[in-house]
Amino acid sequence: MFDLAIIGAGPAGATLARLIGKNYKVLLVDKRSFSDIPGPVSAGKCCGGLLAPDAQRMLSELGLGLPKSVLQGPQLFVVKAIDIQQKIERYYQRHYINMDRQKFDSWLLSMVPSNVDTRLNCRFKSYSSEKGFFKLKFVQGDRNYVEETRILIGADGASSIVRSQTSHGSFFPNKYIALQEWVESNNSLPYFMSIFDKKITDYYCWTIPKGDYLVIGAALQPKKNTSERFKRLKEKLRSNGFQFGKTVWREGAYILRPMKTKHVLTGRDRIAFLGEAAGWISPSSAEGISYAFRSACALAEALHIAPDGFEKRYRKKTRNLRRNIFLKIMKSHFIFNPYLRKMVMSSGLQSVKLFRPKEGT
């Protein structure tokens, strides 16, 4: 019998396991192997691999510094925002860290205490509620397993199986499909790029230079010709002068976009949710790593007091996080309104101008 089972070993799950692993008997499960595969890019979560300032701050508060092996060039500090339909471009200073997301997740997992029972390549299938504990079913290879735990933690991302099987998980945030292609690129762009085009998506698209490749991505509404819309994005990039070669890797995943605070679910009845499984993700930028860290820290604090009543303490400790989500929802309505966005971008507010020497000087 485990005290606590964590489904999902991403930033949220691995951080919680690290923080409470010495005080509880913990089972940590993830369907991924966390090992590289041959090819141009690591096998892992579909993610742009940018560490936002809020996530950097959380690493500082956790007393962690990124190892050199996690970093990925180039390190850039400018975002180019393009509104394709309104033909407006602006540059904004942003302090992101360009990293390899697979190596980042593996690094976080490497710090989990050895006494935590960590099972990789293990797929969680279902759970049933018994008297005072949960019975969990897993598949690893061709074998089926059953384990028992007193507390169940869903940290299994946007497509959380734990949340989908929980009766009080009915208020799901909007789901988008994040598609990314790694394409060959000889041109080292001196910036990241965010792209707005309502004919492609009501969210946003992006490009991120990664070594010898350019990552082209988009958050698209499901069941609305996603492949065709992504193809249209690439065509529009080319027509706007961007040059890139053949696609060497394609990946996709669901991401959540909470547009109401009730979309965030912390849990109850000895079940809790962390990170994106709970709905902790920015609805304006889709940044989720900082929320993964903050929710894991809040739950760890709630559990350090005692296992009994941890659900209410966790919810109380995430009040500021819910307030932050509410503000991001308001910001999202502003950013993704074409008229308001045009007004802000046209004003040049907080934008920077790239220095380009004049010819002949």
Image (cartoon, rainbow, N blue to C red):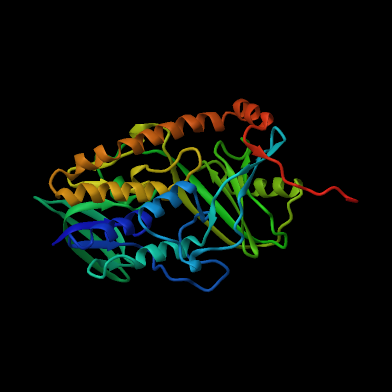
Q: Say which of 114 and 246 sits in front.
A: 114
Residue 159 appears in the figure: no
Give the x, y percent position of residue 358.
85, 47
Q: Say which of 68 and 252 sits in front.
A: 68
In the image, what residue occupies the spot 17% across and 43% down? 269
In the rendered structure, the answer to whether residue 86 lies left or right of residue 32 reads: right
Residue 75 appears in the figure: yes
Give the vertical position of 247 relative to 305 (above or below): below
Give the x, y percent position of residue 261.
36, 32
In the image, what residue occupies the spot 76% across and 49% down? 241
Give the mark count.
0
The quarter of the rendered structure image containing the N terminus is bottom left
Q: Which residue is most to the bottom?
A: 38
In the rendered structure, the answer to whether residue 290 lies left or right of residue 318 reads: right
Q: Quadrant of residue 168?
A: top left
Q: Which residue is most to the left?
A: 131
Give the x, y percent position of residue 324.
40, 36
In the image, what residue occupies the spot 40% across and 65% down? 107
Q: Which residue is most to the right?
A: 360
Q: Quadrant of residue 349?
A: top right
In the rendered structure, the answer to whether residue 306 lies left or right of residue 170 reads: left
In the image, what residue occupies the spot 69% across and 30% down? 346
Q: Say which of 160 and 75 sits in front.
A: 75
Give the vertical position of 96 relative to 342 (above or below): below
